[in-house]
């Protein structure tokens, strides 16, 4: 009855601007959500 999350690890070999942008967007989304989270706040999906 608490938080349940999934953490995935992505590894890219070489340089690819598309994936660099995608991963950058994901990192920004995670940072944004972490800034909005508060202890004891229910999370719905």
Image (cartoon, rainbow, N blue to C red):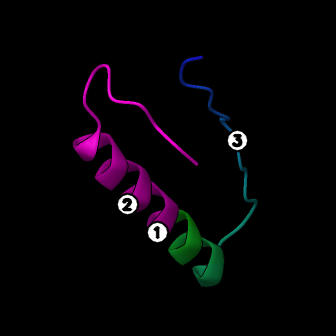
Report x, y in % for residue 29: 41, 59
Report x, y in % for residue 16: 66, 78
Q: Please tell me which of labels 3 and 2 falls first in the chain.
A: 3
Foreground residue, 16 or 45?
A: 45
Residue at the limit of the structure toward the bottom, as seen here? 18
Q: Which residue is mark 2?
A: 28
Q: Secondary structure at mark 3?
A: loop
Which residue is depicted at the point 73% across and 59% down? Answer: 12
Q: Tell me if mark 1 has few (under 14), some (14-19) or many (20+) residues whose alpha carbon lies within 10 angstroms of its own.
A: few
Q: CA distance from mark 3 to mark 1?
A: 15 Å
Q: Which residue is mark 3?
A: 9
Report x, y in % for residue 8: 70, 41
Residue numbers of the magenta segment? 24-45
Q: Secondary structure at mark 2?
A: helix
Foreground residue, 14 or 41?
A: 41
Q: Which residue is mark 1?
A: 25
Task: Say which quarter of the image contains residue 1.
Answer: top right
Task: Reply yes or no: does residue 27 show up in magenta.
Answer: yes
Relative placement, left or right, of 10 versus 34 is right
Foreground residue, 24 or 12?
A: 24
Task: Reply yes or no: does residue 38 show up in magenta.
Answer: yes
Q: Please tell me which of labels 3 and 1 falls first in the chain.
A: 3
Position above or below: 29 against 22: above
Which residue is depicted at the point 70% across and 41% down? Answer: 9
Q: Are marks 2 and 1 in contact (CB under 8 Å)?
A: yes
């Amino acid at each position: 009855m608490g938080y349940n999350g999934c953490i995935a690890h992505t590894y890219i070999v070489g340089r690819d601007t598309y994936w660099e942008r995608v991963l950058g967007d994901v990192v920004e989304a995670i940072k944004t959500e972490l800034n909005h989270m508060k202890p004891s706040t229910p999370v719905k999906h």
